[in-house]
Image: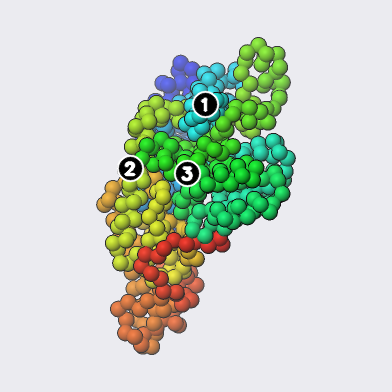
Amino acid sequence: MPTPPLAGGLGGPAALRPLIDTVLTALHDGATLRDGPLPAGGPDTVTPRTRTATHPLIPDHGTGPHHALRNLVTALAAGAADPAHPHCAAHLHTPPLALAAAADLAASALNPSMDSWDQAPAASALEADLTTALAAEIYPHAPSPDAVITTGGTEANQLALLLARERHGPVQTICGANAHHSVTRAAWLLGLPEPVAVPAPTGTLDLAALDEALTELHRPLLVVATAGTTDTGEIDPLDAIADLCATHGAELHIDAAYGGPLLFSPTHRTLLHGLDRAHSVTLDLHKLGWQPASAGLLAVPERHHLTPLHHHAPYLNADDDTEAGLPDLLGRSLRTTRRPDALKIAVTLQALGRTGLADLIDRTLATAHHLADLVTKNPALDLYDHPTISTVLLRPTGADDHTVATVRRTLLQRGHAVLGRAHAEGRLWLKVTLLNPHTTPQDLQALLDLITDTTADLLTDTTADLPVGTTTSHLTGTTPDLPASTTTSHLTATTPDLPADHLTRPPATPTATHPTPHPTESDTPR
């Protein structure tokens, strides 16, 4: 077998071109086979089908590049959850822009490693300029803002706690009950005290409870606020939190992994008022920035705040090389080898400009508000609240939590839709996280029809051939189209692919059609 060609050098593009054609064909074929937002059948179907299609992964004799690419890429695409499909809307899992994915191909072909200048001469200059520019968006009035590229919000939050620890010792972190789980995990990894979680009864951090915690706890203290919660997409009162931190001498980190890109929208940037008062800010452009993962960032108002990250390895940043003018890159991350993720971000920003990115953001948020309006007009659905960013929570009217969970799993099992789940106001909700700017009003209506039709299907399947004297109160808390004397209290599950315990319900609590949002501390992620 001849030695396979390389992706770089003068011959690299010629070697890549036919392979890329094979990949693009396989992506198309896989999407055609899938024919929806995700494959039908659930893990019991997808896993064996994928294993059969890709076996053996390590053959004695290779199949050749085109066959291997066609086989594995087709199998992966056929079994993918496709965030570009308008009904794949469960998580902060963005459909990447084509131009960003193309830039990522160039990064893979060139393969600069961002741990020493001699491995990434141009990429290190590009990254330095990009991180400075993005930090200046967050801290427009700071004299020397800076940022480092991270794998996402989790790593950025960990770095924020690490930098606070290096400045002040074992800081006590205070966060809302609505904070991302990575805050607690970061404290654990860094050997810091477990964060104190203050209530977030309306979905955002309670200011009175924060004031009380800041008064009672010993310093040093680090408050973590959230600009775009995972469950509801809400934004804490950043300016008021910054005021309390200033009063009590606490530092402030803002996790704006989700909401941070609103800075680029003149229409919505006021939601982030007070962001520039934080000692550090997390930003994640593989969410509301449409980048392939990963594309995270931690920004600080002063470059010297990043000094604790400095690390010395003579083979990468020898003192005499640094003194001679070679940039020292090891202080730009806790990682050593890392990809040039700055390239795809820079390509996107340059291609779209401020107005183009603002248009994507505004379109996406308008789509979320349109979905909320559709829900309020549908008597079969309840809306949690109008969205702050692009997350919409809804549930079938009168349903209990078991029914909501079963509807979600049924949509997954059938391959019809990928929806998330979130607890708020003491109940379970279907979570629709809209990040696709191409989603149409027709797509949204079709999604709601899937939810209501699936709910009706489950009721029909479980109320067929019922004996006299049964009701559906244990299913949904309602009795649609059944005489008052009918019950389902002794019903055995008949829905295919669903365990029986999902269809035996405790009595549901009647709910208002459009309840006012008041989640409790225990309802939000810790």
Q: Amino acid at mark 3?
A: Tyr
Q: Residue furthest front?
A: 247
Residue in front for this viewpoint, 44 or 479 = 479
The residue located at (41%, 81%) in the rendering is 488
User: Under tag 1, what secondary structure?
Assistant: helix
Neighbourhood count class around disc 1 (C-alpha, 10 Å): few under 14, some 14–19, many 20 upward: some
User: Under tag 3, what secondary structure?
Assistant: loop
Specify whether residue 331 is in view. Answer: yes
Label 2: which residue?
363
Label 3: which residue?
258
How is colour applied across the structure in the image? rainbow
On the image, the x and y values in percent for residue 9 come to 49, 17
The answer to whether residue 170 is left or right of residue 279 is: right
Neighbourhood count class around disc 2 (C-alpha, 10 Å): few under 14, some 14–19, many 20 upward: some
The residue located at (41%, 39%) in the rendering is 269
Q: Quadrant of residue 142?
A: top right
On the image, the x and y values in percent for residue 214 come to 64, 50
Label 1: which residue?
132
On the image, the x and y values in percent for residue 167 come to 69, 36
Q: Which mark sits nearer the N-terminus, 3 or 1? A: 1
Against 240, residue 379 (above or below) is: below
Neighbourhood count class around disc 3 (C-alpha, 10 Å): few under 14, some 14–19, many 20 upward: many
Q: Amino acid at mark 1?
A: Thr
The residue located at (33%, 54%) in the rendering is 371
The residue located at (71%, 24%) in the rendering is 313
Residue in front for this viewpoint, 58 or 35 = 35
